[in-house]
Image (tube, rainbow, N blue to C red):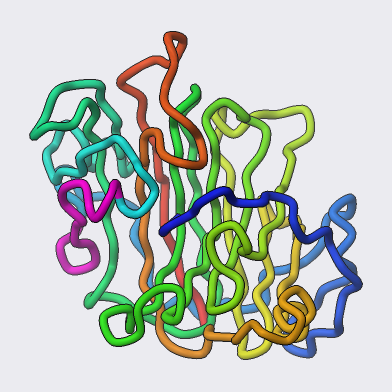
Amino acid sequence: MKNINNRMILRNAIRICSVVSLLIVVSCNPDETQVVAELNNLVMQDEFDVEGAPNSALWTYDIGTGDNGWGNNELQYYTDRTENVTVENGMLLITANREQFNGSSYTSARIKTEGLFEQAYGRFEARIQLPYGKGYWPAFWLLGNDCDQNPWPQCGEIDIMEYLGDAPTSIFGTVHGPGFSAGESISKEYVLENDRFDTGFHVFGIEWGPDYINYYVDNVLYNQITKADVLEETDGQGEWVFDHPFYIILNVAIGGNLPGSPDAETVFPQTMLVDYVRVYQ
């Protein structure tokens, strides 16, 4: 999500599963439903039960347009206004609007747990319903908490779920690090069969350990990335940088290098609904 240029989605086809002693994982065949949730000690949760602004003990905001549209030529201006981010009826609502605001043609929101909740390893998951239409680029992702000292991609990035609004049956999960960032990131797509991500809620998650990151949707494991995979994908040049705390980000970007700009058919406003965010050890 950060500085994604000319990403090569589907770059890494699923590879032979390695045995993970901490998990009961039957297979990495995406056609099989598998047990992936073995980390069950709940250490953080937001059920979005309190109306109004998101819980300030857990969430803060990125405001503005960042550097060059957050590194991706994104079109929105992020705000903390109720029009863009609020909690209603047990849901977090992140809403993108088409409006003129501080020099931008769109507004939206990006909330994060930086400095409030940061953790290395564990099971991170959220139940989300996504918007529809070209130009929408929502995401649920993690960023290393040391980016000020070790600028991206050295600090690491784990994209649990990214989605393009004009492809409502697909999401993808990605890692970025030194030697495998932006267009060279390690990524895999998951395609929902006989359903869409914009018409109902789905659970997006990872289980992350010292040597692996498992990606799942609705309890279906569809990818595993290991230290060995990073070395293999980068001809030995990539560095595993996923052994320190990361924080959570939820956002809805508009336009940018990956989705392209909204078109005449794109409907505004639209909202990403988040039922809950939970983290386990």
Residue most toward the top? Answer: 264
Majority secondary structure of magenta residues: loop
Residue most toward the left? Answer: 102
Q: Quadrant of residue 235?
A: bottom right
Question: Where residue 209 sits in the image (x, y, percent)?
Answer: 62, 85
**Residue at image coords 74%, 51%:** 10
Of residue 93 and residue 257, the one placed in the foreground of this image is 257
Of residue 196 and residue 7, the one placed in the foreground of this image is 7
| In the image, residue 16 lies in the stretch drawn in magenta | no
**Residue at image coords 18%, 31%:** 104
| In the image, residue 61 lies in the stretch drawn in magenta | yes
**Residue at image coords 41%, 59%:** 2
Residue interval drawn in magenta: 55-69
Residue 201 drawn above or below residue 112:
above
Question: Where residue 90 sits in the image (x, y, percent)?
Answer: 32, 42
Q: Quadrant of residue 247?
A: bottom left
Residue 244 drawn above or below residue 261:
below
From the viewer's perspective, tell me whether residue 248 is left or right of residue 206: left
Question: Where residue 266 sits in the image (x, y, percent)?
Answer: 43, 16
**Residue at image coords 77%, 28%:** 194
> Which of the image's four quarters has the N terminus?
bottom left
Of residue 152 and residue 61, the one placed in the foreground of this image is 152
Q: Quadrant of residue 23?
A: bottom right
